[in-house]
Image (spheres, rainbow, N blue to C red):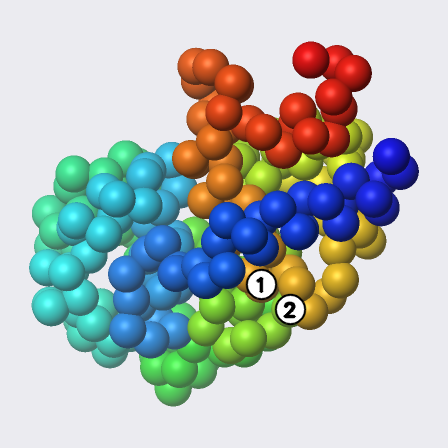
Amino acid sequence: MTKKQRALTVMTELEKLYPKVPIPLDHTDAFTLLVAVALSAQTTDKKVNQITPKLFEVAGDPFKMAALEEDEIKYLIKEIGLANTKAKNLKRMAEMLVENHNGIVPQTFEELEALPGVGHKTASVVMSQAFGVPAFPVDTHIHRLMKQWKLTEGKNVIETENDAKKLFPRESWNKLHLQIIFYGREYSPARGSQEKDFITRMLFPDEN
């Protein structure tokens, strides 16, 4: 089976499993999605969804977020990892959105990645899920599974992202990256048994 054939098999099986995929992080617009994704670094989506309702009640737009003191933001997000750094980034991010973009989340990778606490993956999620621009955000689940399925030899998430974009049709990227994340959580957790990972067994039957 060639790499392209393996990629097609992966797409086919994931479409059967997850014909519809919700965005895991609760949000109401581009700003709340941007904040939620920024908060999700080294923290579970579940935990982020638990703390964001109170945060967004107080600071659901850049103007309100920028008006808060850093300590106030830190108090609202204290239950998640790296709260000190994230509070500092959120305040400055909101200030920059107000100062440079009239409080509107920009719709380019370059402008998003210029914001504090916003890396390429976060920008990719916002571009794909808030604005519908084809992107392939790669997290640890996707990086691990792409290597497991021998679809990449990428040493980091950027190399894996580049390989994914070459293998999978552009129109599939926004949905497919979510499908792989859901599959990883359900069938191939990073820790523990890999017995549920039927796609790997399907791709490489002789190795099982």
Picture disc at residue 52: none
Q: Is there a contact, CB below 8 Å, between mark 2 and mark 1?
A: yes
Image quarter hosting the C terminus: top right
How far is the residue under mark 2 from the one under mark 1?
Answer: 6 Å
Vertical arrangement, residue 41 with respect to residue 30, above or below = above
* Helix, strand or loop for disc 1: helix
Vertical arrangement, residue 79 with respect to residue 17, above or below = above
Residue 57 appears at what percent x and percent y?
11, 68
Name the side, left or right, on which 160 lies relative to 24: right
Vertical arrangement, residue 109 with respect to residue 178, above or below = below
Q: Looking at the image, which is closer to me, 174 or 125?
A: 174
Residue occupying image coordinates x 72% and y 45%: 9
Q: Looking at the image, which is closer to me, 79 or 72?
A: 79
Residue occupying image coordinates x 89% and y 38%: 2
Query: Local crowd at mark 2 within 10 Å, few (<14), some, or many (≥20)?
Result: some
Residue 182 appears at what percent x and percent y?
45, 44
Do we see residue 91 in this rendering? Answer: no
Q: Which residue is mark 1?
A: 174
Vertical arrangement, residue 78 with respect to residue 135, above or below = above
